[in-house]
Image (tube, helix red, strand yellow):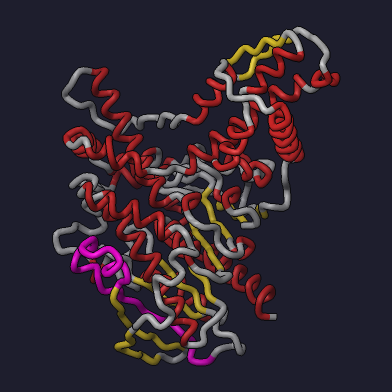
Amino acid sequence: MSQFDKIYRKILLTKFFTKGWGKPEDLKRIFEFRKILSNREKCQHLIPEDYPVHIEKESIQKDYKILEGHFESPLKNLLPGIMPKSTEIARFQVILPNQWKTNLKPVCLHLAGTGDHYFWRRRNFMALPLLKEGIGSIILENPYYGTRKPKEQLRSSLHNVSDLFVMGGALILESKALLHWCERQGFGPLGITGISMGGNMASLAATNWHKPISLIPCLSWSTASCVFTQGVMSGAIPWEVLQRQYYADEIYEKEIRELLVSPEDHYKSAYSIGQEFVRTATDLTSDNRFEGRHFQHDQKVGNLSLEVSSAASQEQQFGAVSKTEANQARNQKIDCIENLTVNVTHDHKESGNQTVSTGQVFSKSLKSDQNLLDNISKQNDSQSRSYATNSFSKSIAQKLKRPQVERPTVISKSPVAEESSTILQQKAVDFMKGVMDECTHLGNFSIPVDTELIIIIAAKHDSYVPRDNVLNLSNLWPGSEVRYIDTGHIMAFIFNHNVFRQAVVDSFKKQIKKYYS
């Protein structure tokens, strides 16, 4: 991990979420709406194609022109009262060449990262240089930033955790409105990009678009939960405030927690169950033992000790894994196993700006694992056995339980007994991980229409967005491409805009070749 990232964060004095989680009723509304917003089919008609967008100013320069416009955020009417008044009007700039290079008019939408207020940074470092490549740009101002910042908010320091989710929901819908506007103007192909927080927001917005779109998320990953519970940003959070609020109102524990869905739990538990099955089945099926031979076998599976003395006892052990349970495992997306790649994207083994195209290299062993799972399911179906409680099935149930989140050391001790303090801290961090995964984890959203148009830029030594303990984004989106920069988050942001721009150009070239040639 980058030491510069850690030092840079310590220099900054800003704190996030100083007023806590946000109103419980707001969180409940947001989480319920997320279940609609994350389904592309359900929300395809939330934003009409002729959604009103107003251009209020046009400025002609030597080689390009700048349009300035605004429109009412669709979230204002879909979730009335959820947005602060200052955030309700979305403002944007459009940077277009005076003369297009071809008959095509490619335009890329740029979403802001943390601290990127107004338009100038994205205009000067991304949009204007992209004009030389024949690509126009739209720069959208984030809710809570620039002219949309609430007066009482200090710089980029969102007051509540819920503010981040309001920002994300608004940007998904506002991006959709702008993409519809682009089509009405005859622009295309279309793309969307962002850096850091903007990369995650761009990814969320792209999942909601119903057509192939170039997507270039830079310095972001599959979820924001790792940013606020593992990365250096966890030190900018007033954990004691969040802890007190969590325990002061039981609604967080009894009602809101029940609404949370983390793909980390589903994917990882399904994967571990699959591996559990495979490790056991490999030994039990050797030497044709499923044909009725009696044998004595003591096998350790994780923390389990499985003793099989005959074909009948063996059948009893495997009978616990019924067809119903196999289907439940599949319902938890166990089918994603066959898409898991040989981990050529291990962060610690990448070098330079290495390019990894997922979906090309699959693990043969994982494919055979899936075949074994299918055989087990068929065997159990033919036996028509009911579910029997035993040590093996109990182990599976344990695997399905919510994994514990390691508590970051930045949490201050609460003035209560040490044991109670530890529990309180752990639950606050676990709840933070849960709410962040609920609203920002890309596994909770539709897969973009064409993942081959996705180019992901990641920093190998990123201390802001640690990737070690979360699902690999390229596994969630098979066919996407990952490019690594051999540095940390801050240095990558400062010195590698050329890498970000090249990825935008390359993604648009892919789209043009595939859909416009």
Q: Is residue 78 magenta?
A: yes
Residue 169 drawn at (x, y percent): 35, 61
Front-most of residues 421 and 397: 397
Q: Residue 56 sits in which quadrant?
A: bottom left
Name the outermost residue toward the right. Answer: 287
Identify which residue is drawn at 38% across, 55% down: 34
**Which region is colored magenta?**
73-99
- Using the rendered image of the protein, determine whether residue 459 is visible from the camera's viewpoint: yes
Residue 358 drawn at (x, y percent): 66, 52
Q: Residue 53 sits in which quadrant?
A: bottom left
- Using the rendered image of the protein, determine whether residue 194 is visible from the camera's viewpoint: no
Q: Is residue 280 magenta?
A: no
Is residue 149 rendered to the left or right of residue 137? left
Identify which residue is drawn at 33% across, 87% down: 55
Tell me the quadrant of the picture where the C terminus can be found. Answer: bottom right
Q: Is residue 514 placed above or below 278 in the rendered structure?
A: below
Residue 98 drawn at (x, y percent): 48, 91
Front-most of residues 508 and 33: 33
Is residue 247 rendered to the left or right of residue 53? left
Front-most of residues 107 and 335: 335
Is residue 133 rendered to the left or right of residue 180? right
Residue 279 drawn at (x, y percent): 69, 24
Q: Is residue 441 placed above or below 141 in the rendered structure?
A: above
